[in-house]
């Protein structure tokens, strides 16, 4: 069972911006090969750091309002939000270790 959760235009505010925990958001599309390759990496992060962060996905084709609001022009785009603010942005695919280094401050 997937540990990442789908978030929509309607639920983004409540699930991400108002979350008490930091939230890693992947903006993705079903037609994107890099997004497919990134999925297992984010699943691993979601499992290993479930007590520290939430990991969610926003399909940019199905949720254009959120994609436009955050200026998404390339997928995958992975943002970390804390206290309603975008704190970290990563564009493209990376290994699990890369994301652990990028998000280290929030994974302790």
Image: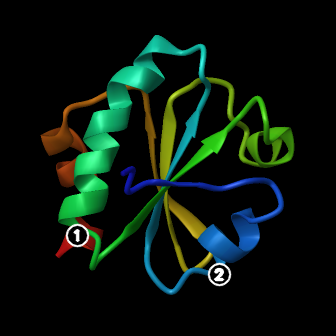
Q: Secondary structure at mark 2?
A: loop
Residue 18 disc label = 2
Q: Badge 1: few (under 14), some or many (20 or more) residues near its Cα, within 10 Å?
A: some
Residue placed furthest toward the left: 97
Residue at image location 75% in from the left, 41% down from the top: 67
Q: Is residue 49 above or below residue 60?
A: below
Q: Residue furthest front?
A: 1
* Dot 2 crowding, Cα within 10 Å, few <14, some 14–19, many 20+: some
Foreground of the two, 106 or 35: 35
**90 is higher (above) or lower (below) than 100:** above
Give the residue at x 18% y 62%: 48
Quarter of the picture holding the C terminus: bottom left
Q: Is residue 80 left or right of residue 15?
A: left
| Residue depicted at x 51% and y 86% | 20
Q: Secondary structure at mark 1?
A: helix
Q: In the displayed orientation, state which residue is furthest to the bottom.
A: 20
Q: Nearer the viewer, residue 5 or 82?
A: 5
Q: What x and y, as percent, mark residue 6?
A: 60, 52
Residue labelled with disc 1: 107
Q: Identify the mark nearer the N-term, 2 or 1.
A: 2
Q: Is residue 103 visible?
A: no
- Where does the image place residue 32, in percent across and percent down from the top left? 54, 15
Q: Position of residue 5 (x, y in %)?
A: 52, 56
Q: Is residue 93 left or right of residue 88?
A: left
Count of all numbered marks drawn on residues in the image? 2
């Amino acid at each position: 069972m997937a540990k990442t959760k789908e978030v929509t235009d309607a639920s983004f505010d409540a699930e991400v911006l108002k979350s008490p925990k930091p939230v890693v958001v992947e903006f993705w599309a079903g037609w994107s090969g890099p997004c497919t390759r990134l999925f297992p990496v984010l699943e691993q992060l979601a499992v290993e750091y479930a007590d520290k962060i939430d990991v969610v996905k926003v399909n940019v084709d199905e949720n254009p309002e959120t994609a436009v609001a955050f200026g998404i022009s390339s997928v995958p785009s992975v943002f970390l939000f804390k206290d309603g603010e975008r704190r970290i942005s990563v564009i493209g695919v990376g290994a699990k270790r890369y994301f652990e280094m990028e998000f280290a401050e929030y994974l302790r």
